[in-house]
Image (cartoon, grey):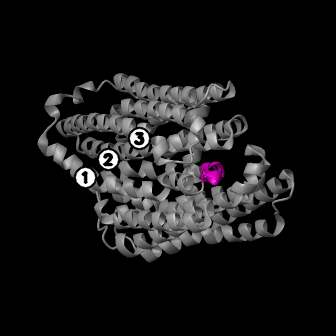
Amino acid sequence: MAKNSLANLARLGTSWLVVLFLPPLLVRVLNKPTYATWVLILQLGAYITIFDGGIQSAIGRFVARAHSLEDDRYMGQTLSSAGFIMLLAAAATALLTIIVSWQLDHIFHGIPASTGNEARKALFVVGMSLALSLPFSTLAGVFLGLQMNEVNALAASVGKFAGAAGAAWAAYHRQGLYAMAIWIGFGNILQGLTYLLAWMRLGVSGYLRRSHVTHHFLREFVTFSFAMFATQLGGILITGMDMPIVAAFDFHSAAYYAVAATASTMLSAQGAIAPALIPVASEMNAVRTPHHLGQMVLKTTRYATASLCLITMPLLFGMHPFLRLWVGSDYAHHALPLAVILVVAQFIRQTLMPYAAAGFGAGQQRQMLTSPIGEGIVNLTCSVAGAHFFGAIGVALGTLIGACFGVFLHFTVSMPRTDSMAFSPVLLANNGILKPIACCLPSVLLLLIVTRPAQRLASISIAIILGELFAILFLWNINFDAPERSQMIALLWSTINRNYLKKSR
């Protein structure tokens, strides 16, 4: 789990590098309406990748189960049937891309007429490249299920770097949205080809055969994935609709909201831990008791919340100087309140990601459907109402309200129904979430007292470093007990010995 979490973190690190590198350039070479249109195009393309990530997780769950049972026939049925479904999904994506790109400026009236034609072509290129890359997600799911997350991290990093570097080059040379989209499409295709090369090196191509596609397994996979699709739909309603809502109701603020939303994604380190739990939970569910899986949920939630606190504090208190250096004073002034609200909403939502990932791996996603769907409906309703009355800030507040409601539904509705995990919800809330937060409260109070937005970057940085050190000290001595501290030290030492000391010898 530690190895795969680090691989996922490296994958997220690539995304962070792209985030740090690309928006500062784009906001300086594109005017605000054009930049807002570009982010809107990427957001529409992201709807495809959301479902793509869910499919990968579903495939990974079945692969992990087949691997633990050493059932090659089950493995072949899994991969062949999933590959067939992904081919159908690619065709549907291509058709949907044609329709939406054709009607883009009619759907979003705020898009300037001068960029409408180029925006349609850019969306067409991005959507088609994603459609072509969808079948390769079957291979990505294999590496996820076999706990070879480093392959997925490499493929994603190669694709993102190539696409971002090309888009930045095209933007800097004023070549327009269409040229930028071509580079993003090239990165998407390159990512899929990287999966293919890794698959060929793995030497298990015999699993993919048309004869392995059966009606029985197609029905089993689709039935399992149905709840996952509903969860992903809830995810789109939670975060994916924010940018289109802002673009529809307050296009003037769309560029500022895009910057704030991008900054809030830096809180996604929790996403490095949750995917690593899916194959582990799947295998534990097959061979262990609900008590063991429940103990894993309690422990990983406590660890994950601690890491989440350590990432959130510098992000919140250093947000203003970061935005000022990153995208300039004008964007910093308008995006700061939006970014703070979105970061808090992300923090609240991600505290229960280990529980959701373990439940998914154990095949109990149906029992957890109420929370994402309920959160999505509340988020969408509050965001539309907030956008109508308050503009972009209302959309951010709608996201915050939805996050609180989603956590509430998990505790009151989902947890009593997930019988594959035996744990106390009260213990999860107290020890898994509130205890790490309480360890960081002294640092939060310190930073509230000593930091001001108008302070110099050096002063704020010193204060944040001291706050982080105090938080780490409290977490180390209070949040983790003596056996856990010894275990972490042993893990760190074995990693250093394996990766560095042996090489030096």
Q: CA distance from mark 2 to mark 3?
A: 27 Å
Return the x and y of residue 279 as percentages of the image width and height.
Answer: 36, 48
Quadrant containing the C terminus is top right
Which one is in front, 276 or 413?
Answer: 413
Q: Which residue is mark 3?
A: 100
Label at residue 224 = 1
- The chief SS type of the magenta part is helix
Could you tell me which secondary element the residue under label 2 belongs to? helix
- Disc number at residue 251? none
Tell me the kind of residue under disc 1.
Phe
Task: Determine if the magenta segment contains residue 89.
Answer: no
Residue 260 can be seen in this image? no
User: Bounds of the magenta span?
Assistant: 251-264
The percent position of residue 501, horizontal first and vertical second, equals 61, 33
The disc at residue 58 is 2
Pick whichever of labels 2 and 1 is earlier in the sequence.
2
Q: Nearer the viewer, mark 2 or mark 3?
A: 3
- The reply to whether discs 2 and 1 touch (Cβ–Cβ < 8 Å) is yes
Disc 3 to disc 1, how far (Cα)? 29 Å
Q: Amino acid at mark 2?
A: Ala
Secondary structure type for disc 3: helix
